[in-house]
Image (tube, rainbow, N blue to C red):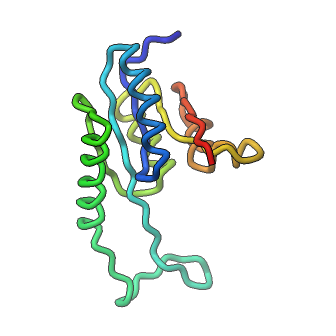
Amino acid sequence: MTDYKNILVAVDFSDAADTVIKRAVDVAQRNHTQLTLLHVVEYLPPMDIAYEPVMTSSWAVDEEALVKQASDSLHKLCDKSHLQDVVPVVVVGGAKYEICEYAREHGCDLIIMGAHGRHGIRLLLGSTANGVLHEMPCDVMAVKIAE
């Protein structure tokens, strides 16, 4: 087994996050390394008929508030999971892109994320996990999440 030195754990705030974190903690302990927990805040602006983003006066998103809320939730998740030496990170953007970008910029050698147990490879992993798996040169661990 490879000795991992820099493990990135992509989490959302669903019940599945607990399962993913437990598996990540086990891998981190065996490799004597710390974890980075990454949450990506995704929001989509309204689209017009030509599929172009449209910002209207009725569509106002307080990005700072979304990031603050996600950061608070990530810290609560760390507390709930009794994680001490974890780096919690919140970024804004598309999940696949931001996970891959963070992993590249920080030299991560393992990405751990959840995968849903449906049918077919795309549904098995989900579009984000599937995209990360095919995009990254490092190892990607897909933790199966029971439906």
Q: Is residue 121 left or right of residue 72?
A: right
Residue depicted at x 62% and y 50%: 127
Residue depicted at x 26% and y 53%: 71
Q: Is residue 57 above or below residue 9?
A: below
Residue depicted at x 33% and y 81%: 60
- Quarter occupied by residue 4: top left
Q: Is residue 78 left or right of residue 30?
A: left
Provide residue 3's location: percent of width, then percent of height: 44, 11
Viewer-side residue, 100 vs 23: 23
Q: Is residue 83 left or right of residue 98?
A: left
- Quarter occupied by residue 103: top left
Provide residue 85's location: percent of width, then percent of height: 23, 28
Provide residue 107's location: percent of width, then percent of height: 38, 27
Provide residue 47's location: percent of width, then percent of height: 53, 79
Q: Is residue 92 above or below residue 35?
A: below
Q: Is residue 75 above or below residue 34?
A: below
Count the marks.
0
Residue depicted at x 33% and y 75%: 61
Furthest residue toward right: 120
Q: Is residue 57 above or below residue 8?
A: below
